[in-house]
Image: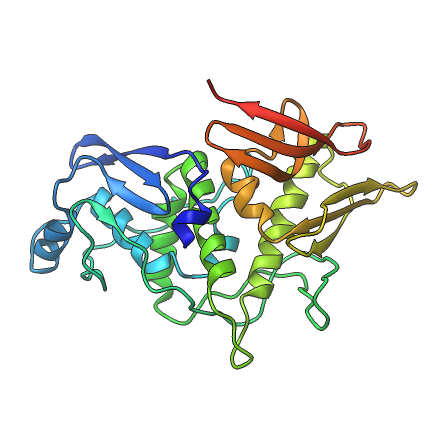
Amino acid sequence: MTQVLLSQHQPALARVSCSGETHAIRWEGGDLVALDHDDPEGERTLAVLGGQSCTCLDVLGAWVRQREEPALLSALSRGPSDSLRTEDFRPRPSLAPAATTPPRNVVLAARLGRRMPRGGSGTFISSHPGIAVPGGAIGPPAGDPSTREEDVALLAGLGHELTHRLVATVTAALLEGPQSSKGPSHQPALEASLFGRASFAIRSWLGSPELAVELEVAAPDADPTLNWDASGLVHLALPLGWVMSVWGRDMTVVAGRFCLGVVESNGARTTLISVGSDLGSPRPLTVEIS
């Protein structure tokens, strides 16, 4: 089902230095593909048994381990000018085998539904009673912190276009995953991700880094809105899926207009609801790739 949610996203490509050469890694439909390795799982097994690992295999392993983690939403960049410092992370000496056995050079989605403790960043209004995300970073899940940091460094180093798709994949998985009254919820991580990315995007679009933004999490079937009152406060109402359907497709700003949601998407033709820099009434905007 996650791949269905991501089916309208265009593939993204990253190039990495691997074994003294430049190799390509492609995101498509939620999976990462090492284009220059015929049997990466076999190579990873050999690396664990004493062989030598390489960057492509390390990236695939990092994605298998982290693609279910809500904390990855807060760890990856919010936009082109929001870079993540990775130079202090050390390369991994070896990799453990993947929990699943993907065919050939494709890393498949692991089992969905893992949850993380409550936490978040930013401040916003929630449409869900009792849920408020205070300032601060989302806490990472339990585990080896050095492994997690190295995984994040590898994934963040894949570049802006591909990491957009990684965030979209995690978001789609969490929106699709089962929710239970027992244990922590994915909701705080999703709301913090929405606030961070939407507020960063609108501040960048308007060229106002100190702009006050108030966000309401809208229901999936509600109309998204953007209003600017006399005090200079911008009010946004967006569904959680905006991170996947708009931001994750790198369509936050199209033709100088800020996009609030997708009205229709069919192959090469996408219609969005958008507002101009005058923050007037929302209007449809159609993008067609010929």
Report whether 12 appears left or right of 259: left
Residue found 71% across the figure and 73% down from its top:
130
Residue at the image position 38 percent from the left and 44 percent from the top: 87
Q: Position of residue 219 (x, y in %)?
A: 68, 56
In this view, the residue farthest toward the bottom is 182
Q: Mark yes or no: residue 88 visible.
A: no
Q: Quadrant of residue 64?
A: bottom left
Residue visible at 60% across and 31% down in the picture: 271
Regarding residue 282, the answer to whether it shows in the image is: yes
Residue 129 as seen in the image, left or right of residue 192: right
Q: Observer-nearest residue: 237 or 211?
A: 237
Furthest-right residue in this view: 230
Residue 10: x percent and y percent?
42, 34
Camera-side residue: 265 or 149?
A: 265
Q: Nearer the viewer, residue 230 or 226?
A: 226
Numbered label tally: 0
- The spot of residue 231 in percent (x, y) is 90, 43
Q: Quadrant of residue 181?
A: bottom right
Percent across and percent down for residue 109 are 32, 56
Question: In this rendering, would 251 be left or right of 215?
Answer: left
**What quarter of the picture does the N terminus occupy?**
bottom left
Q: Residue at position x 18%, y 58% from top?
A: 101
Q: How is the image coloured?
A: rainbow
Using the image, determine if residue 189 lies above or below residue 9.
below
